[in-house]
Each structure stands twice: as structure tokens, then as C-alpha cells.
Image (tube, helix red, strand yellow):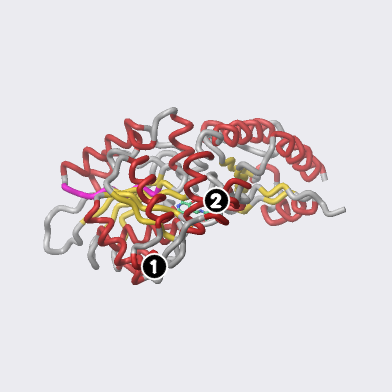
Amino acid sequence: MAKVIIDLRSDTVTQPTEAMRQAMARAEVGDDVFGEDPTVKRLEELAAERFGKEAALFVASGTMGNQVAILTHTSRGDEIIVESEAHVYFYEVGGIGALAGVQTRTIRGYRGTLPADKVRQAIRLSDIHFPKTSLICLENTHNRAGGTVTDLEQMEAVGSVAKEYNLAVHLDGARIFNAAVALGVGVKELTKDADTVMFCLSKGLAAPVGSLLVGPGSWIAKARKWRKMLGGGMRQSGVIAAAGIVALEQMVDRLEEDHLNARKLAEGLANIPGIQIELGRVQTNIVLADLEAAGIAVPVFLDRLKEQGIKAVPFGEHLVRFVTHKDIAPEDIDTTLWSVQQVMRS
Ligand code: TLP
């Protein structure tokens, strides 16, 4: 019998639901480069409405969404302000420099949240030597900080600094629905201070492909052109957009289950000698386990765990990341904890 795999590497591994597969099979489609795919249009309208923005653009991935956003907001030689471990900076293959030709001013956040006073200090004054600051990028939830949430007040604080200096704010909201569910706030309210938002359908919401950019109508029209330049103009993409509509309509409220599973996992891991968990960081569906005190190398730990059918990813010299999602049940957390105990004993 094949071994059961408990895949905690990422919420990107989620399988589409039966409702998504059915919607995909039935989707009415057309050529979206000609603006003729009714299902893509419906998804874009739904996304814009959910976020209270004028328009939306369906893109292939979160990375494409962020890169298109930066290209649309900036000009070559500008500077953008980002958190020092933000996904756009850390994990997007250097696209900010290579594609948009802008440089980054990084700020160390507190659990992934950018303090408004530090943002203010980082904004360039008008001086012939300086690049122009043109954009502030936020990330909510913050992946590398451990799925931490930036609350409404902190979003507003950065938003008001941006307004004061007439700067745009782009939010990498790959997991914004996790943040909204954790805070008990709607996404419209939580993202009102961001001019533009990228959010993913293919993470906790379990759609197979796709992300959206939402923002002002004229900005989305410009972004559509950049998407085309990057090769992201898709044709009968209603087939995948159909799953995205199901994701938005059916998969948001259940994220709370993933958060409960993450909490259970974190508390269980914290009780295993040698494993350190900063429980205050466990706010959504991500758990970071620090193995430094255990004296076991991360690759060895992950190999042993994999032998037991459990997958997680390395997240730094001593850190391992576990992500809960809809294909992880509470019993899988029990099995994971038992297996980690075995690995640590051996
Ligand atoms: N994150 C992936 C990896 O790239 C690390 C993951 O497994 O968590 N913004 C944030 C905050 C993300 O976490 C990710 C994906 C993206 C953007 C990019 O999305 P995709 O993978 O669709 O390009």
C-alpha cells in the first residue's frame, strides 16, 4: 500500500475541489486577449467588488501579479520601500531589478509589519543625488515572518504616510483572506489603504491556478498591457478562472480550520524537546519551527520526516516551515506530531 503523504510544504499544494472541477468543465470561454472570455470577466468583476476597487486583472501567478504591479507603479531608476524579507524582494528571482529596473530600500519589520515611522524615514527627499521613492510594498499575511498579520490600524498608519508624500501602496496579499479571517475584518476594509492589491486563488483558497490584481480602472488598463508584454495574455482562460470563482465564493470561510490546525501543530511541536516555536507568530496557517537547540540539521530532519510520509520545507539555517491547508485534517496534525517525536527521539 502506498504511504499516506501529509504535505505541509505549502498551501500551494492544495487539490482543486469537486465543485471547481465541475465549474472548469462547464465554463463558458472566449479569447481573453480580445476581452471575450465571459468567465474571466466575471471573476475580475467579482474580485474588484470584493475589494471595493474599480477593476481587476486575472494573472497567472502571484509573482506575475506583483511584478506587473511594480512595473505599472514605477519608472526605471525609482526606489521602492519593502520589508527586508518580503516575497517580492526575497523570492521573485530579482524581478524588481531585472524587469522594472528599480532599486529596493528594505526595512526590517516587526513580525512582517512595516512600522510607519520607519517608512517615513526611508522616503527620499528631493535631492539631485537621490532616486525617487515611488512605491511602498506591504505583505499581509507575511510569509517569511510566519504567516503574521498586519492589522487594520497598522495598514492605516502606513497608508496615511503614503498619502502625505503622495506615494502609491501596493499590497502583496497572496494570503490576504487568511489575514482577514484571522482579524475578523472584511478584505475591503483591511485593504482600503492600499491603492492596488495582488491576491492568490491558488494558495489556501485551493484553486489550481491564478491570482488577481485589483485597483483603479486606469491603472488596471496599464497593468493589462504589462501583463501582455510578460506573455501573460491568456486565451480561453475562463477554464481556470471558473475555479477561481468557486474559490472566492466557497473557500474563504473555511480558512479558520487551517488556522486552528496550525495552532494545534504549533502547540504540539512546542512541547517536543529541542523544538522552539514562537507561538505569538502563529496567527494564521504557517508554523515556523526552530531546530537550533535540537542539534539536528534541517535537511536531515526533513529527510527523516519524509521517510515517515510527511513533507515540510527548509526556511533558513535552523528553520522549518509547515503550512496547513484544506487537504490537511486534524488527524494529520496528530500523525505529524507523533512522527516528529519519533524523528527527534532517533
Ligand atoms: N509563496 C510560495 C513560495 O514562493 C515561497 C510559498 O510556498 O509560500 N507572495 C507571497 C506572500 C507568497 O507567499 C507567494 C508564494 C507569492 C507572492 C507568489 O505566488 P506564486 O507562487 O503564485 O507566484
The local secondary structure at tag 1 comes to loop
- Amino acid found under the numbered disc labelled 1: Gly
Q: Residue furthest top?
A: 184
> Distance from label 2 to label 1 (Cα)?
22 Å
User: Is 38 placed left or right of 76 in the picture?
Assistant: right
Choose mark 2 or mark 1, whichever is in front: 2
Range shown magenta: 166-172
The main secondary structure of the magenta stretch is strand
Q: x, y percentage for residue 314?
A: 61, 53
**Viewer-closest of 204 and 262:** 204
Mark 2 highlights which residue?
23
Q: x, y percentage for residue 343?
A: 78, 45
Residue 83 visible in rendering: no
**Viewer-closest of 25 and 1:** 25
55 part of magenta stretch:
no
**Viewer-closest of 292 and 117:** 117
User: Is 327 placed left or right of 256 in the picture?
Assistant: right
Residue 203 visible in rendering: yes
Mark 1 highlights which residue?
233
170 part of magenta stretch:
yes
| Residue 163: quarter of image | top left
Query: Residue 200 has which mark?
Result: none
- Badge 2 density bin: few <14, some 14–19, many ≥20, Cα 10 Å: many
- Badge 1 density bin: few <14, some 14–19, many ≥20, Cα 10 Å: some
User: Is 18 placed left or right of 169 in the picture?
Assistant: right
Dots 2, 1 in contact, CB < 8 A: no
Q: x, y percentage for residue 254?
A: 56, 34
The local secondary structure at tag 2 comes to helix
